[in-house]
Amino acid sequence: MWSLSDEALVAGFAACEPDAAAAFVRRFQARVFGLALTMVGDTAIAEEISQEAFVRAWRHAPSYDPRRGRVTTWILAITRNLAIDHLRSKRPEPIDPEACDRATAVWARVASDQEAAPGEDNAQVREALSSLPAEQRRALLLASLFGYTAREVGAIEDIPTGTAKTRIRTALLKLARDEAKEPIAGDETGGAA
């Protein structure tokens, strides 16, 4: 089972094949739990989010479309959305800037392309994020990784909502410009979509 592609495991998962389901969970459990734990910061809640992510993946496996993205991206998006739902259910609390730095490292691992040389994309993501000024990096991570709205980012950072929007937008534009200049590993189009 371990030699099967991710897509074949999803198909087996959708068909309720026990071996495929077990292999699917084993293949992705560390990444799913790691992302959940990084986002919520509580082991018990991260375990619940991870379990729910696999339940949702099982329910939606028949509708998985490989043309829309890789399996890793799909299962981690489910996990991320569940973690965001949990975080939004709580009142906004101040986020330690060091938590954003730790989240950057985890997000870089999550975003890495399995087909690229090991660690190559990790380094690109870390480099791209580290090229941003700290306040833009924090605003972008709070919005994209933790799922906060611009208004919530403003409250957390103690800045006006407009300033939060500007920081997020400026960071995204800078990353997009940098990506257009340098092709991503495995992307023969030069980064243009």
Image: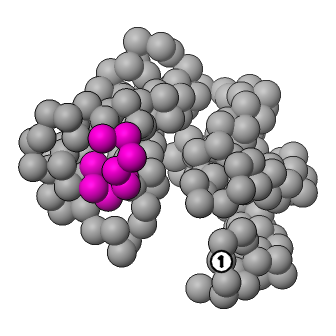
**Is residue 86 shown left or right of residue 121?**
left
The reply to whether the magenta stretch includes residue 4 is yes
Comparing 68 with 44, the one in front is 68
Residue 131 drawn at (x, y percent)? 90, 57
The reply to whether the magenta stretch includes residue 131 is no
Residue at 72%, 41% in the rendered image: 104
Q: Residue furthest top?
A: 44
Residue at 37%, 30% in the rendered image: 26
Quadrant in which the C terminus is drawn: bottom right
Q: How many numbered markers are drawn?
A: 1
**Is residue 22 shown left or right of residue 144?**
left
Residue at 67%, 84% in the rendered image: 188
| Residue at the spot of label 1 | 187
Residue 57 drawn at (x, y percent)? 25, 45
Quadrant in which the N terminus is drawn: top left
The amino acid at mark 1 is Asp
For residue 84, say whether it is visible.
Answer: yes
Q: Which stretch appears magenta?
A: 1-9
Task: Reply above or below: 29 against 162.
Answer: above
